[in-house]
Amino acid sequence: MHKLLERQLRRSGLLESLKALPEAWQAFLETVHQAYEQSDTDRVMLERSLDLTSKELTQRNADLRHQQRVLNDLTRSRSIYLGSLQETLGKLTEALSKTLGVERAGVWFFNTDQSKIVCSDLYQKSKDHHSSGVEISTTEHPAYFLALAAERTVAAHDAQHDARTCDFAETHFKPLGITSSLSVSISFQGKVVGLITNGHVGSPREWTLEDRQFASSIADVVSLAMEIGEHRRAEEEITAAYGRLRQTQAQLVETEKLAMLGKFAAGIAHEIKNPLAIILQGENYLRHVEGLQSPEKQEVLLLMRSAVNRADHIVRSLLDLARPAALRLGNHDFHVMLDSAFSLAIKPFNPNAYRITKNYTQESVSVNVDEDQMQQVFINLVVNALQAMPAGGELTIRTYTKTISADDSGVGRRATDYFKLGDRVVACEIADTGCGIPANKIAKVFDPFYTTKPRGEGTGLGLSIVRAIIEAHRGLIAVRTQEGRGTCFTVLLPLSQ
């Protein structure tokens, strides 16, 4: 008899009297006894069930808290806000794999016509390895992609036999040992652009609600990273456009300033040129006058002639700056022209004092230029380089051809832009190892009357005229320098068609 039943009958005083009852009553008591036994069994099972449920709830709560921490860390990741999508994807796939305990986690994006998906990052936990580049045709797996289009999440507990995913069984799941898969679509700007995949290896697993929600949250983080990246690219384009606008404005101001200065210089030059001619004639007359033939007086007259000739040179330079001579264009071998200019420029100097390196492209280079004016450009640049190294140094002349890209200055679609994207040009670099140009003066080197040479050794018009000639040929000149290390001027000219 069940102990609880026996205790209750003993307490009521019926136990002894019931023993004397007929067998029918004994059978009834036995039935009651079995009911008590079953009650004990049910109670034990219920207690165990409640205990398991409590442990499961505790574990699920712990998993949820962990997932939330992972998501918080990911959304605060520096790579997201720097717009570094690829770095972000690597962190996301690794977080997916380790948090959900799956062997393989990946991020895939559709190509333009959605005929295939391309893996941007795939993390394999057992090897701690990231890879990318795998492509899968969408037309060969219609059921899977139709399911993703109909519902955001495809949770296949038995991936090799699930109707939505079984197309991958022979090609992917079985070779990789994947038994369960969880996929979530990625949306961006209202369109499905890719998907998150999770491949579980081992015994098939049931994807919990928490698993699906976490994978969906990771897909949302991908969308967030793409949105931030888009904004950063837009900001960079706006900043670059603003920089180009500022540069164009500065060029317009500089052009207007030079135009006004040119007119002013031309007026002054004309006013000075006639008196200089009279002085020169007077000096020529006095040189032959009796009583002025002594060496001392002739030396004074020679100094007068030298000063007048220098003033005349400045006047001519002013006129060249104000009204450049009309171009007499013709196709010329660029290297022949460059060598000719170098030969003229080096004559006043001692070539043995310099290490001269010519590094010319092996290509045949032809340019449509005014040969005399372009030789003037390169003579001026070579002379400046040599004068910057009074104690000797290294002069390097390098040429090469290139295709104009968006990174080059003076490039655009406007008629005033010197080059268009894709134009072919020849570049000539003339570099010295002299004292360089101070950083606070580099912006002024092409300004008229600005010179870094000592007083009396330069007019400050040479580089202004050089730039004017190059720009008249639809070319560009740029300078880079490092104080104490040297200076390099780069000339770009369009190749002959």
Image: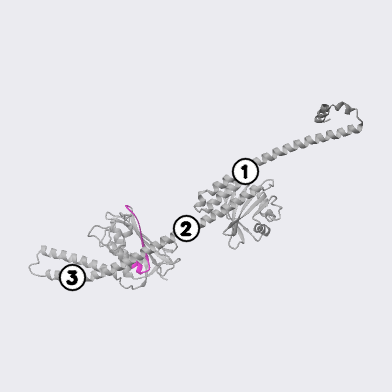
- In the image, residue 311 sits, relative to residue 229, either above or below, namely below
Disc 3 residue type? Answer: Pro
| Residue depth check, mark 1 versus mark 3: number of the one nearer the observer | 1
The residue where tag 1 is placed is 63
Disc 1 residue type? Answer: Asp
Task: Of the two numbered discs 1 and 2 on the same chain, state the one appearing first in sequence.
Answer: 1
Q: Mark 1 and mark 3 in contact? Answer it, CB < 8 Å.
A: no
The residue where tag 3 is placed is 275
Residue plotted at (36% across, 73% down): 330
* SS assignment at label 1: helix
Residue plotted at (87% across, 26% down): 16
Q: Which residues are magenta?
A: 469-484
The residue where tag 2 is placed is 235
Q: Is residue 289 left or right of residue 17?
A: left
Kindly tell me whether residue 361 is visible in this rendering: no
Q: Is residue 362 magenta?
A: no
Quadrant showing the C terminus: bottom left
